[in-house]
Image (cartoon, rainbow, N blue to C red):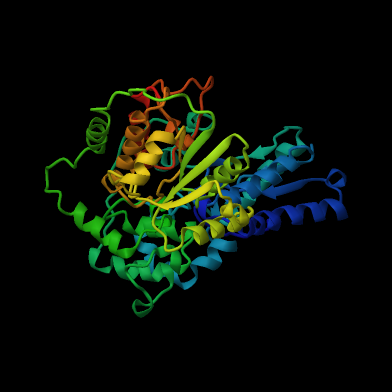
Amino acid sequence: MTLVLSDGLFTNQTEDSIRRVVNAKWDSLTTLDTVAPIQTLDFCVSFSSVSTLLGNQGQSNYSMANTIVDGYLARHKNAFSLCVPSVSDLGYFARYQGARWSTVKSTMLSPDGGFSLSLGSLSLTQSTELCAYLEDGLLKLYSGVRAQYYIPELPWNQLHKEVGLGSDTVHLTTKEETTTVVREGDESNVFDKVLSLLDLSASDFSPEVPFTSYGMDSLAATRISEVLRPHIKISQMQLLGGMTWDQLEAKMQEAGTVTDGASPPNPADHLVKMVEKYSKNFGDHIPSSQPPTEDIIVITGTTGSIGSSILVNCLKSPNVKRIYALNRSSEDPLEAQKVALERRGLDPSLADTPKLTLLNADLSAGDLGIGELLLEELRTTVTHIIHAGWLINWSFDLSRFDPLIRGTRNLIDLSLSSPLPTPPRIIFISSVAVLSGCECPLLDVGFHLDLTILTQLSKAMKCVSRTSLSRNTL
């Protein structure tokens, strides 16, 4: 039953934040198994989590910890894991809510007056219900029913609507009439409710500082999302992605500009227009030089997690003669690269390798922000382009990512303008989330990936860039 949380986007997790959460559960279990071997006990039950079953945004480390324990217990016939929803009247949730719960409770009541606040839209339960689940699981165990994982009855329809269920659980939903629940809300005191949930006074709060800087975890993000629901739909992931009050207020004002009876703009239309904008008027590739004998590579985003690892592997490759690393502007690109490598446990001295050229760049500019002379050097020599630099901000709409998509198109144009017999191959570091529900024949993966997409926004942004790439044979 041990629980330690250190919530945040996966890209913001560190080895320490993962180990701290995982070890809290794993060390407890292995200590128990050493002192009192599980196979000698009458039974052993681990409290897992609904967030592990469905995947809760911002809790990848916690889901990992539960999954490890669940897998370990699955080897024992006298043990099982209990999928536990958030318990409202004891444990972490009860301690966390404290006095602050009463200030926002009225905005989070279900239509029948019961609690329906969710952790990532995962419904709450009471301790008495939890005991009933445990009793039922033990009775099944003693009656010979072999189950590694006990899942209680949950509001599957609500969960499917809010977070999306996978193919392994969607069959549990039932058909129902669509109803609209109107919650009373006073927009004038939304700010006060948000401050209350963050346990802050107005004097300690800056509207331009991200909510996460004030210690907001996935639980607080979910509760803030619920408070905002009468006014605007903001997801937990958007809040955890660095959103500020200024950005939130602007979104609420923007939502209020839609007149009664008017249909809101369709995001799909914007997506189609952007695809059309960046997927036309490609130049022809005209070879005019001899084939290269060595690889010369452009890599973007080498100060990021994936980019750093790619850079190190390319630097160590004897087939690579030169690497141009293009990153966002920094006062000292060399120092920034060394810090990025060291932070990820990689050798920072590799940044001093003579074959590495570090450049401040702006990919959205016609000359990539490096000047015409350097651009011409890249155009005539580069053999491969690895595009790993991509901004992550779940609070941005698609239009805010226009510079990144324009930068991808500029890299395509750079490749097509190469005089080499074969234009530089472009490798775009995309995301598995893009494949969720994608029916277009972009890749022959050989199997279906049943993944819950993090947000449709991420899918749209990546699809625009990837569609531009797929319309050219590089």
User: Which of the 4 quarters of the picture holds residue 137?
Assistant: top right
| Residue occupying the far bottom of the picture | 203
* Of the pair 284 and 373, the residue shown nearer to us: 373
Image side of residue 437 versus residue 6, left or right: left
Q: Quadrant of the N terminus?
A: bottom right
Can the viewer see residue 383? yes
Image quarter in which the C terminus is found: top left
Tell me how many marks there are.
Answer: 0
Is 243 rendered above or below residue 356?
below
12 and 78: which is toward the camera: 12
Q: At which x and y percent is residue 7?
A: 53, 57
Residue at x-position 51% and y-position 46%: 307
Where does residue 185 sit, x and y in percent of width and height? 26, 60
Q: Between 319 and 9, which is closer to the camera in this rendering? A: 319
Q: Is residue 123 left or right of residue 470?
A: right
The residue nearer to you, when weighing 274 against 383, is 383
Q: Is residue 84 visible?
A: no
Quarter of the image for residue 274 reads top left
Q: Position of residue 227 (x, y in %)?
A: 35, 59
The answer to whether 382 appears left or right of 61 in the picture is: left
**Vertical arrangement, residue 277 with respect to residue 315, above or below:** above
Q: Name the spot of residue 64 as percent of width and height, x first.
A: 62, 47
